[in-house]
Image (spheres, coloured by chain):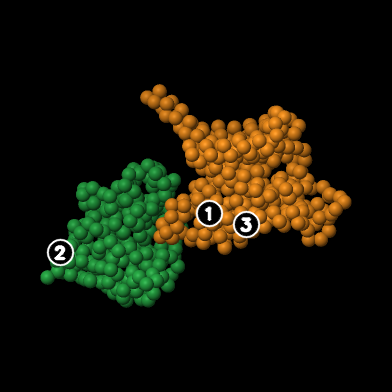
Amino acid sequence: MIVLDKITIRFGGLVALDAVSAEFTAAVSGIIGPNGAGKTTTMNLISGFITPTSGKVLVDGDDILRMPPHQRTRWGLRRSFQREQIADDLSVWENVLAITDNLPGSRSDRRTEAEQAIDFAGVGKLRHRLGASLNTYERRLTDLARCFAGRPRLIMLDEPAGGLSPEETDHLGALVVRMARLSDAKVLVIDHDVDLIQRICSETLVLDFGRRIAFGPTREVLNDPAVKAAYLGVEHA
Amino acid sequence: MKVTGLLAAFAVIAVIGLLPTILGGQWIGIFISTTCFAFAAMGAGFMYSRLGMVSLAQVALMGLGGWVTLRLNHATDLPFEVNLLGGAVATAVLGMLLALPALRMRGLYLALVTLMVAGGLEVVFTAFQFPNGGAGFWGVGTSFSAPMRRPTIAPDDANYLRYCLAVLVLGFLLIEAHRRSAPGRAWALIRRSEAAALASGVNVTFYKTWAFGLSGLLAGAGGGLLAASLGLLDAATFRASESVLLFALVIVGGARFWYGAILTAFLYRVAPGLLNTWGVDADLALVFFGAALLHAVMTAPDGIAGQINDLLGKVRKEQTRDRA
């Protein structure tokens, strides 16, 4: 279970997150909201790039905000970014190894984990290709392989379907669901594609201007008049 | 691939064996100096191409390696190799220590911090000079100069050049071993973005410090080898402006490729030597370097080495097409 407990983040006078609380219990959950709602800020907080003004984040009871950012990966945190972060001068295989290098276990264990991640994402044929030569979809799949590598406990995907065609988005969505099933990790997804969120996320948190405006089963949340007004642009009666 | 590797190894052995025989007189000395500065160029190029960090202190760090090697030589009876290692390790440690306050900076600010370090070392070298066997901590005597030991297997200049080239190959292999293993992958992620590196579990502070240390180790080794080549060192060799010039030439030579460091050192030491031989003022080289830097910045971001690599790539492609 992922618990966001009254998270508040202030940047000077700007309140980026205002006492946001939520308890994600589903295997795959979503965070949606208009631009500037605080979605990526939430992920950056969990990653350790931002220190909260107040509040806690507990994952399966572990207070992960107490760990230094790089040790969160060792603990089991994985994430992708809106703009994928594949190193251009490393091959697909090396990009995945760059994660497993920092995980516990022997060298052979880590290589096996990287191998499994490559197989999972279906990028085995690309393993020797340099990051610079990959197209957007191949880069996104490599990102998924990196997130699946090792024994992840919490995977955060920030707009994983950005720039993909509908067919590619479908395949990626199926991989995300499979990722949660195979790894026992909780997956948090941010995306503007509401269809994708509806299809793969059982629970969804909706943020607007740093405040929680809805949280619960995705279908119910998307039918919430406040969500329609804030996010989908429908007038709130 | 194995055949290519064997051919490369054969070529390296041939160059090490034959180069000192082909060269004569003053050129052996110039090539020893070129080899020593190739260490500093290698370190600066590796920091720039792998991490995107600009170090403007490489020549100054060479001076530090030379200082420690000379000091150990005059203070102890240890063999040259131990003194050289001592100089290289001491420079690596200082490089790491100097890196710590600079780790939160990037780009221009980091470059300025390294330049200030170079300036500080220049002041120290100018004020206290290099050890020559005198008494006290600084080891500087005014009326004499004790001999600097060379490796027992390379007492003369020709063999010493071979020795320096062999150590240079070890330096390249050390960088390549890093590139192919966890540090190389961590550095590639840090260059992509520090956020991506942190999210991949990379300890950014540790790996950046390591990079500074490795770069210092190489520069220190170059300085130690230069000390044994000349017998004593002069503060004017390690001015901060020399570090800036060397970095500019790293851009011209090409930081991404190993032979870029050799091209850089050639430009830095051999080009002025050639101009002298032709009876032209060696300072004219600075004008050529400025023009070459402009050319590299505008049209060849990977420098001369990048252009050679592109050319080789085209030749290989054409050969493949012909075979098909």
Taking the spot 75% from the left edge, 48% from the top edge, the residue there is B234
Residue position for label 1: B108
Taking the spot 59% from the left edge, 46% from the top edge, the residue there is B247
> Which of A228/B141 is in front?
A228
State the SS at label 3.
Answer: helix
Q: Amino acid at mark 3?
A: Met
- Asked whether the residues under marks 2 and 1 belong to the same chain, the reply is no
Residue position for label 3: B116
State the SS at label 1.
Answer: helix
Q: Amino acid at mark 2?
A: Val
The colour assigned to chain B within the rendered structure? orange
A212 lies above or below B227: below
Crowding at dot 3, Cα within 10 Å, few <14 / some 14-19 / many 20+, comes out as: some
> Which of B1/A2 is in front?
A2
Q: Cβ–Cβ below 8 Å for labels 2 and 1?
A: no
Query: CA gap, disc 2 to disc 1?
Result: 49 Å
Taking the spot 30% from the left edge, 64% from the top edge, the residue there is A36
Q: Position of residue B147 (x, y in %)?
A: 82, 47
Residue A234 numbered tag: 2
Q: Earlier in the sequence, mark 1 or mark 3?
A: 1
Residue A61 numbered tag: none
